[in-house]
Amino acid sequence: MLEHNSFQERLNAVKNGEPIPKPPMPKPIIQKPQIQQGQNLLTYKQFFVNEGYKLFNVLSASALYGFGLKAIFGTEWNFIGLLGVGFLLNHGLTLILKLFRK
């Protein structure tokens, strides 16, 4: 914090009927943008591992939702139908959660 008596000087100027002095303005500190040395670029292996993990999560959640709905409604779906229904439920719930989070 700056050490100055600007408030005191302003009050005394008002009390004495003098023009109010302007407070001293601090010099702005300009910071140079920092350049990152070595950017974090993904290799092909890291990219495919990340995307494979995301795909596995979506497929496993869809399969679990599909098995759950199959058990609740007692239907006879094949595995592709099970994944399809689970996929629709998974993305429907995701959209609903995104709407309520905003």
Image: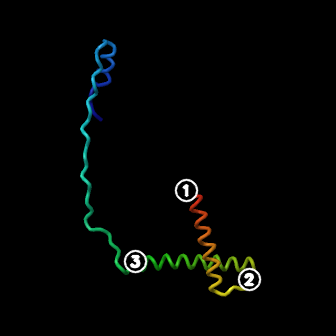
Q: CA distance from mark 1 to mark 2?
A: 36 Å
Which tag, 2 or 3, sits closer to the chain's start?
3
Image coloring type: rainbow
Which residue sits at x=62%, y=81%?
A: 83
Q: Secondary structure at mark 1?
A: loop
Residue type (three-letter) at the residue carrying disc 1: Lys
Q: Which residue is rendered at x = 33% and y = 16% of the image?
A: 14
Give the amino acid type for the residue marked by disc 2 in the picture. Thr
**Mark 1 vs mark 2: which is more N-terminal?**
2
**Does 96 sit left or right of 49 as displayed?**
right
The spot of residue 38 in percent (x, y) is 26, 68
Task: Write down the residue under mark 3.
Answer: 47
For residue 12, what is the image quadrant?
top left
Callout 3: helix, strand or loop? Answer: helix
The residue depicted at 73 percent of the width and 76 percent of the height is: 72
Indicate left or right for 74 with 31 as reference.
right
Quarter of the picture holding the C terminus: bottom right
